[in-house]
Image: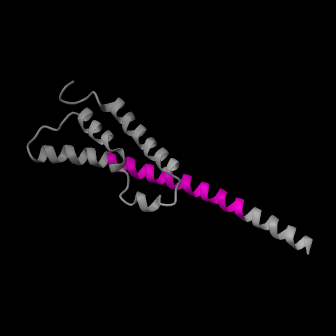
Amino acid sequence: MAQGAIYGLCSYIFLHYITKAGQAVTRIDLAYEILAEGQHIARSEIVKQIENDIADGRRPPPMQQILEEMLMEPDETLPADREERMRLWPDNDIRKTVEEHRKFLEGLQEQHGGRGRNS
């Protein structure tokens, strides 16, 4: 009987930790996927805004302005279904993912923010 209890306890502990390890890998993979989609969305939004301004006969705003607007709400350029995909995540992991996306936008701002009408 004691042997069965020990076997059962060890099995439970093993399954508990292997499940946790699998969730972490899945969460990291999903975070990278969400960030990659967010980068694509951000770039597409920049191009779309510039194309729309040109099509309407307006001069596009400087990249600095476009990126500053994006940085006000960085999660707006993440995938629309991100909340559903991240619903079981700890709040800290969600914040880290949004912060990584903010860093991407800040990097774009450093690379391209000075170009445009005002430079």
Q: Is the N terminus in the top left, top right, bottom left or bottom right quadrant?
A: bottom right
Position of residue 70 in the picture relative to residue 86 (left or right): left
Q: Which residue is drawn at 10% across and 41% down?
A: 58
User: Per the image, is 33 magenta?
Assistant: yes
Quarter of the image containing the C terminus? top left
Q: Residue at x 21, y 46 (%)?
A: 49
**Quarter of the figure with residue 114:** top left
Along the viewing direction, whichever of 6 and 51 lies nearer the viewer? 6
In percent of width and height, residue 61 lies at: 18, 36
Q: What segment carries the magenta color?
A: 16-42
Query: For this rendering, which residue is in front, 60 or 3?
Result: 3
Q: Position of residue 93 (x, y in %)?
A: 52, 49
Q: How many labels does the image show?
A: 0
Question: Residue 59 sits in which quadrant?
Answer: top left
Q: Main secondary structure of the magenta part?
A: helix
- In the rendered view, does 56 fall on the left or right side of 94? left
Q: Which residue lies furthest to the top in this view?
A: 119
Residue shown at 76%/62% (left/top)? 13
Residue 45: % across, % down: 27, 48
